[in-house]
Amino acid sequence: MTTPPIICQSSDIHGHENFPMGCAFSPDGTCLLTATASDGKFRLYDTPFQRLDNLQKIEQDLGDNDREDKDENHSIDKSTATGPQHDDIKDETATTPCSHNEIQDHTQQDYPWKASLTSHQGGPPPSASSASYSWYPLMTSSSPLTSLYATCRGNSMPIHLIDAYTSQLRASYRPYNGVDELEGPTVIEFSPDGSRIYGTGFKTDRTIAVFDTAIPGREGRIMRLGKTRRSSDGQKGIPSAMAFAKSSGGDNNGPSNVFALGTYSPGSIYIYDDRMATPAGTIVLHGGLAVVGHGKAFARKKRRFEHTDNDNDADDGGENLFSSARVNWFQSRARGGITQLTWAPPTSNNPYVLYSASRRSNAVLSWDVRALSGLDLDGDAGNSRKRSGGASRTICGLQSFARDGDTNQRLEFDLDTNGNRMFVGSGSSEGMVKVYDVNTGKLDDEFKVVDGGGDAVNGVSFIPHPFGMNDGDGLLAVAVGSRHFYEEDLSDNESEREDVPRNPGFLQLYEIKR
């Protein structure tokens, strides 16, 4: 286990059970956005480029001194050195302080990494509310007009578009439910080209509110996941996660209408395409592909996985049994409720992979969307069985990446630029970050963030290193914190339990080298 150097740690998060809920670097990597739990603030931290530059110079100086020491040692006349003297010289060179250790000492010095801006639009939220935020995908700090991020908190609060330069409100988007009441979403996402804002996670209905970014207000369109709230068609559950597939060019410079949507219990993942010729109004999303299904459709899909009688029963019975067990394992890990969805980058080896994390799940899962089993909601299972020669094709779960996820809290993960490594946050019993090789599924490295446990690593975010010399070098932001609940103890005094100190959460910035 190799702990990378710590660049800095936040010093401005205070208060009882106040901790960052996830974190996200801006698209250009110049700042870091997070939301804190108890005070309801959205905090914007500047990436400490000056500090990184100073640490790079320290590393170079230490490396030059190390090389000079080695040159002096090698210049000693070995012919006149006796055995013990030679051993002493060898020991001295072997115990020369490593530049990594000295850099670590420099990073441990007091560095006031504080939020440059905070946003408190809409007032403090209820203690049980969640916060969602999303960067404008075309954001660059050199263009103030694009320096934006969107926020939402659920309840009766609209979607806010915040200026990342001034922390002022740029625009508001107000979704209304079926009884004409303002209802705030709990999940928010931009389209890859930034032209649309999607809000979902409403408690009253299975809908997605879509707004034109250039047109604030209540004018937008509503996409329904079913004809009615209680109808048996469509995707069930409260939407909890959303992710758009990026353009094949690798940049967010073109329209993309394909997105994945995950829901809470019963957990499900569907893939949609919202390209329709219908004018603004109510749209029912039909024909979605189910990665993880549920309800009547899922029961029908499960019947398709059952063993069918054919002439090759004796030959492929073991294979079908293994395939069915694999499907059941992947489905069970995702049924607790989806908390995060992420597509593989377009530059990865397989850009058609979808990654998902679930509530109270001990693994992050990857799915190959090129090999889905399909819905067959219109009774087309027989035709598909004929086309496949009588055999059913299961959902293709590719890899699983283990973690400690025995918590209802959202635990995030992130991929590097090329999609070759995955950084996974773990629960309070471990308090560490795990680094996986995405291609092989093997654990490459792990490092401890919280000593002694007690707090979860609930958020991670990766960007390429601004001064990195090697491909794969980068900066990793880590969000630490969780809610603590007292166990019932009749012998304890209630006033004494309230006085028990709890350390607030914090953000840390690590330097990752390949």
Image (tube, grey):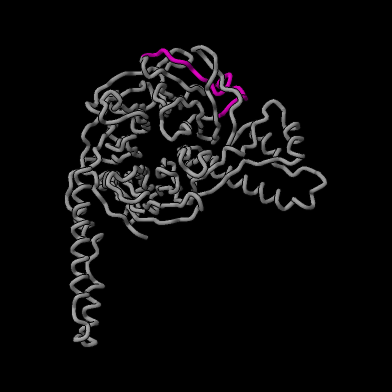
Q: Nearer the viewer, residue 403 or 1?
A: 1
Q: Nearer the viewer, residue 420 or 15?
A: 420
Q: Is residue 158 visible?
A: yes
Q: Is residue 490 visible?
A: no
Q: Is residue 397 magenta?
A: no
Magenta part of the protein: which range? Answer: 217-236
Residue 210 appears at what percent x and percent y?
45, 20
Q: Is residue 235 magenta?
A: yes
Q: Is residue 84 above or below residue 133?
A: below
Residue 439 appears at what percent x and percent y?
50, 50
The quarter of the displayed image where residue 138 is located: top left
Count of picture labels: 0
**Does the magenta stretch mainly form a helix, a strand or a loop?**
loop
The quarter of the displayed image where residue 134 is located: top left
Residue 40 appears at what percent x and percent y?
29, 31
Q: Residue at x 25, y 37 (%)?
A: 45
Q: Is residue 232 above or below residue 30?
A: above
Residue 155 appears at what percent x and percent y?
39, 24
Q: Nearer the viewer, residue 341 or 196?
A: 196
Q: Nearer the viewer, residue 477 or 425?
A: 477
Question: Quadrant where the N terminus lies?
Answer: bottom left
- Please indicate whether residue 431 sits to the left or right of residue 499 in the image: right
Q: Residue at x 58, y 19 (%)?
A: 227
- Please indicate whether residue 373 sits to the left or right of residue 160 in the image: right
Q: Is residue 243 above or below residue 90?
A: above
Q: Is residue 388 above or below residue 449?
A: above
